[in-house]
Image (spheres, coloured by chain):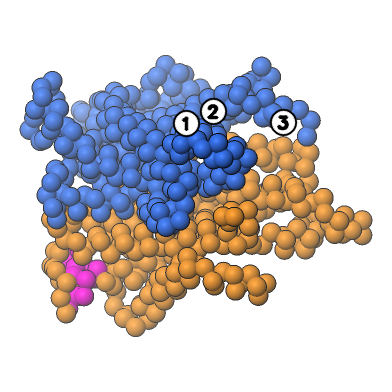
Chain colours: A blue, B orange
Amino acid sequence: MRYALSKAAWYFMAFLAAVVLNYFLPRLIPGNPVDTIVARMAQGGGSEGEARQQMYQTFLREFGLDRPPLEQFLNYLGNLLQGDLGTSFGNYPAKVADLIAASLPWTVALQLPAILLGWILGNWLGVLAAYRGGWVDRWAFLGFLTLSNIPYYCLAILLLYAFSVALPLFPSFGGYAPGTTPHLSLDFILNVLHHYTLPFLSLVLVLIGGQAVGMRSMAIYELSADYVHYLRSLGVSDRRIVWSIFRNAMLPQVTGLALAIGSLVGGALLTEVVFSYPGIGSLLFTAIRQNDYPLIQGITLLVTVAVLAANFIIDLTYGLIDPRIRSAQVGER
Amino acid sequence: MNSLLAQLLSKGRFRVSVAVLLLVVAFAVLGPMLDTRNPLFAVGGRYDPPSANAILGTDVIGNDVFLQLMHGLGTSLKIGLIAGLVATAIGVFIGTLAGFLGGVVDELLMGFTNVVITIPTIVILILLSVALESRTLVSLALIIGVTSWPWTARAVRAQTASLRVREHVDIARLSGASVFSIILWEILPYMFSYIFMAFVLQLASAILSEAALSLLGLGPDNTISLGKMLQLAIQGEAIRTGAYWAFLPPTLLLTAISFSLLLLQSSLDEVFNPRLRRA
């Protein structure tokens, strides 16, 4: 219990630090942020006179600039606790929370299956390579290393060019064919999957590489353990030996999985940018181009909270699984 | 030390990565000396294919891709170098201090480090670069540097904590040496290889961070970098119009740099860290 509380306190501090950072961002811009923002927005044309005045009032109220600094911060916190992330500049008068809610499913649907599949395949291939040894291992390792060391957005660019331009097998942008509206039909689902393939592949390949490299070195370590020799001398089948190595080298890899799921939202923003795929990454890209500070803040906050929550859960479960960790953290050093 | 070098040179991975890195650096340093034209000056039309006039063709606004590549590579390397040095320096400073002093200082410094570690780097990077009035090469490098030190600090702290109970450290302490001189002369030299490896990793991640920020539209202003080249190519639809010369060179160069730096790190790790070798 004491362990959980002290962990919770640390994470709360990290969360607070992130919130403070988020809070100060638009206030670091010299002068009155609302003036600057509305002026910048106006440069892009569009809103005039009445509409602009209304916009100005909205943001003045949301930022609470007419009140003392401490109250401004509390005001921000209060809104945050109610799930109110403010109003978007770029898509005025859309609420930031709604924009994010509309994009998040795309990102999750792209990332979650990619992470799970990449994790399973990567670990399995890593153990297999270590167990086989010899030239299989050498070449497999080189392959894993290459995949895991290519920046994921570079791989995305290469795949996009190779399979949608040079060899036009897949569509080159979007989540579904332009001009169609999302609906439930076989055609539409096939169309979505068609658009899904390349971004998905680019994520899975990088993940396989990273997981396999880690798992391979863990497995090599395990290979010299007594139980492996014992199983071998008993004449147990290769498949079962690989399986037991797999299970024993698992714990750190499980952490990796949880971390990957936690950084799901922020982990592959650029994949969406490269493929012009709808989702949080594309939303952030647009927000940055439009100086849409509330939207940027909302997204960075979401990314942070997801990562913090995943870390917190990992720490708690580790404490439960392995009592040594708990006591080492709480006890005397 | 010589035997270590011989050991390193006997590794194919080490030789390949060093060769690639030397080529890359030579291209970035010698290129602009041999060809002094301004890379931000248009020499042709939109996406002219490679020709005698421009070996790698032109980009979306008619700039010479080859020229941009030389200068962009230079910018990326400089950002990586500055950010890597800053991150390593902060990490080593905090890590050695926490590991050597222990107690409350350790607790506070590591608590701080852990807080920074859990906030995703990309988030701090985005927030800081959005808040910047103008993004220059140096300010961007500093931002990347001050956000990426925590892992180094954590690793260095662990090393320091194990070094500090050595006898030569005790002797220095008994002879009245100050904390900083002990850290400088009795601790740091013993983990130099370790710090160098950390620096190599920081260098690689800083170069990639610059590219990622640029792709999001937060790259350095008024200059060209590998990341900005990619961003211009993506925004200018180079990929979809098949102008491979505009996006393949920076993509491949980034991949080569990151790959060879990580390869270098892993070959160094294998020599300095014998546990990783296959029996």
Q: Which residue is mark 2?
A: A314
Tag 1, which chain?
A
Name the kind of residue labelled 1 in the image: Ala
User: Mark 1 sits on what residue?
Assistant: A258
Toward which corner of the image does residue B254 lie, by quadrant?
A: bottom left
**Amino acid at the residue labelled 3:** Ala
Residue A70 lies, in percent from the top left, at 54, 26
Proximity of marks 3 and 2: CB atoms separated by less than 8 Å: no
| Residue in the picture at 45% in, 24% down | A76
Q: Of A55 and B36, which appears nearest the observer?
A: B36
Q: Chain of mark 2?
A: A
Q: Are marks 1 and 2 in contact (CB under 8 Å)?
A: yes
The residue tagged with tag 3: helix, strand or loop? helix
Q: Which residues are magenta?
A: B53-65
- Residue A252 is one of the magenta-drawn residues: no
Q: Give the total of numbered labels.
A: 3
- Which residue occupies 86% across, 56% down? B167
Name the N-terminal-most of marks 1 and 2: 1
* Image quadrant where residue A223 sits: top right
In whole angstroms, how far apart are the C-alphas of marks 3 and 1? 22 Å
Where in the figure is residue A24, as x and y percent of width and height? 48, 36
Q: CA distance from mark 3 to mark 2?
A: 16 Å
Question: Label 3: which residue?
Answer: A328
* Disc assigned to residue B122: none
Mark 1 Cα-neighbour bin, 10 Å: few <14, some 14–19, many ≥20 = some
Instruction: Label 2, secondary structure: give it.
Output: helix
Amino acid tagged 2:
Ile
**Sequence-first tag of 3 and 1:** 1
- For label 3, count other residues whose C-alpha is less than 10 Å away and answer few (under 14), some (14-19) or many (20+): few
Q: Is residue A40 visible?
A: no
Based on the displayed image, in which of its 4 quarters is residue A302 positioned? top left
